[in-house]
Image (cartoon, rainbow, N blue to C red):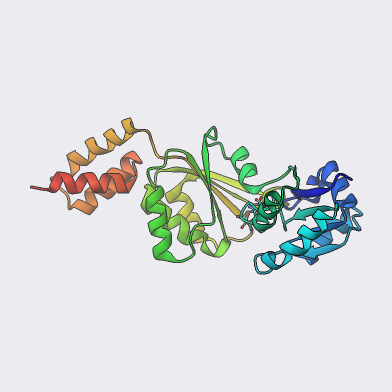
Amino acid sequence: MTPGLYVVATPLGNLQDLSPRAREVLQSVAVIAAEDTRHSQILCRQWDIRTPLVSVHDHNEQDRVDGLLARLRAGEAVALISDAGTPLISDPGYRLVRATRLAGLPVYAVAGPSAALAALSVAGIPCDRFAFEGFPPAQAAARRAYFNSLASESRTLVFYESPHRLAASLADLSVAFGGQREATLVRELTKRFEEGVFSTLAELAARANAQAPRGEYVLVVRGAPPPAETDEGERVLALLIDTLPLRQAVDLAVSITGVPKKALYARALAMRRP
Ligand code: SAM
């Protein structure tokens, strides 16, 4: 087999999603660098892949790089996989791929599933332009600041989130982006309990709050409305600001128009200034 590092995408849950080429590569390389060798053994058993596995995860990747690079330099073929989907996409492998490139050795993509693209393909939200954001910060204050910084982003946004932080993230997003922003929450892609809910951030936050989320989730959020809609937000705000307290006027204008709160709050402060 041609020597080099093969970055191999593996199924998101449905083992039938391993491509024939991915199987052949995994059967033929000298070694498979896997995020969790025990987890990957399930895939290997299913597809009769008997290649030795070595673990490469966030805590040992730097140490493993030298050994794997030595094998690549010696002319071996090495595969890199993660627990699910495409390695490096919110998964380990960046250091190994970079080191292999810096050494001038070939890196081949054995393309396949990734939860972000699978979610976009079923979301029903414009995806001609999008920004993949991975996991939002876990800590509440950092997460809110981060969502505020994204409120005016006009591209569709894709987030990964763990089930136990999902309700908090949706609540924070609803405040930062306005509850009326369109979003699709997909769960357990390609698995038995796969489902998707196309709604608004406010509605998704309420649902996540009412029933304990379980499984794996991707959230796809429509980008901020174009400036013409921001003008509409300002027009509504101007009508409300003289009769309501500032915060209430902003919240109402955000709910009515879907314009990001950050933008309208700044406008409200300017309108109130003597
Ligand atoms: N490298 C992977 C990829 O290409 O998508 C992502 C790995 S990241 C550590 C794991 C996150 O991906 C999960 O927390 C979830 O947000 C998302 N994910 C992975 N598999 C999924 C699935 N079957 N359904 C929904 N989301 C999934």
Choose between 213 and 80: the one closer to the eye: 80
Drawn side of residue 168 relative to residue 215, left or right: left
Choose between 174 and 131: the one closer to the eye: 131
Q: Position of residue 260 (x, y in %)?
A: 34, 44
* Residue in the picture at 18% in, 39% down: 238
Q: Position of residue 45 (x, y in %)?
A: 88, 58
* Residue in the picture at 87% in, 52% down: 29
Q: Position of residue 155 (x, y in %)?
A: 47, 38
Quadrant assignment, res 50: bottom right
Furthest-left residue in this view: 274
Which image quadrant: the N terminus? top right
Choose between 145 and 67: the one closer to the eye: 67
From the viewer's perspective, is residue 156 above or below residue 142?
above
Q: Position of residue 218 (x, y in %)?
A: 58, 51
Choose between 143 and 34: the one closer to the eye: 34
Furthest-top residue in this view: 228
